[in-house]
Image: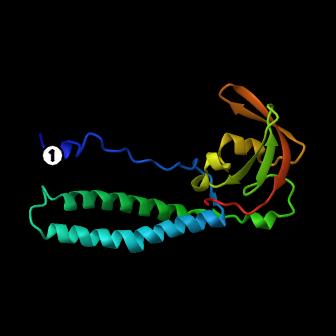
Amino acid sequence: MSKAFTKESEDEEELELPQELPVGLKNYITPAGYQRLSDELDQLWKTERPVLVNTITWAASNGDRSENGDYIYGKKRLREIDRRIRFLSKRLDNAVVVDPSQRANCTQAFFGATVTVCGQDGEERSYSIVGVDEANAGRGLISWVSPLARALLKSQAGDVVAVHVPGGVDELDVVAVAYLPIKLFD
């Protein structure tokens, strides 16, 4: 069988695909999120890619490329980097940067708001509504297109919102809405 139809290794990891935006929606993002994506693009384009191209060029000059690990895996990594660069470029080109600090006096929950809610269990939790590329549910950063964020949008302190969860419907009391600086990472 031709090598073109075989896997390079059986334990090859599947690439994690980034979350796609629903068709027709804008790519809202906070200034910190935009900066993080821009920094990653610069790192890949200006640092990692040139070093990798030099390694591939050196490996190609060694002769037989069919059994040259540096060449084979270098080309594979280069494809991954180029794919990520294309993705980041498109994401940044289509990004609409929204600064939450511009809504400091707003009492309704919109993009960039940090909303504190109290669940039926009596426990208070805070969620910041951020862009798709910034979401990290474990840190309380929820994407503005998520069901929870959609339920919280336009709510105010004192409102009760219904969130559809796999077990049915969960009601959350909105305790507070604030526009605080959002930390994407420590």
Image quadrant where residue 167 sits: top right
Residue 143 seen from this side: no
Instruction: Residue at 63% x, 59% y: name it.
Output: 184
Image quadrant where residue 92 sits: bottom right
Quarter of the image with the C terminus is: bottom right
Viewer-closest of 16 and 29: 16
Quarter of the image with the N terminus is: top left
Residue 182 seen from this side: yes
Q: Which residue is mark 1?
A: 3
Instruction: Residue at 13% x, 43% y: name it.
Output: 2
User: Which amino acid does the dot numbered 1 rest on?
Assistant: Lys
Instruction: Residue at 86% x, 45% y: name it.
Output: 175
Instruction: Residue at 30% x, 68% y: name it.
Output: 52
Q: Is residue 5 left or right of residue 32?
A: left
Q: Is residue 160 above or below residue 132?
A: above
Q: Residue furthest right?
A: 158
Q: Is residue 159 above or below residue 68?
A: above
Where residue 154 sits: x, y (%)? 81, 49
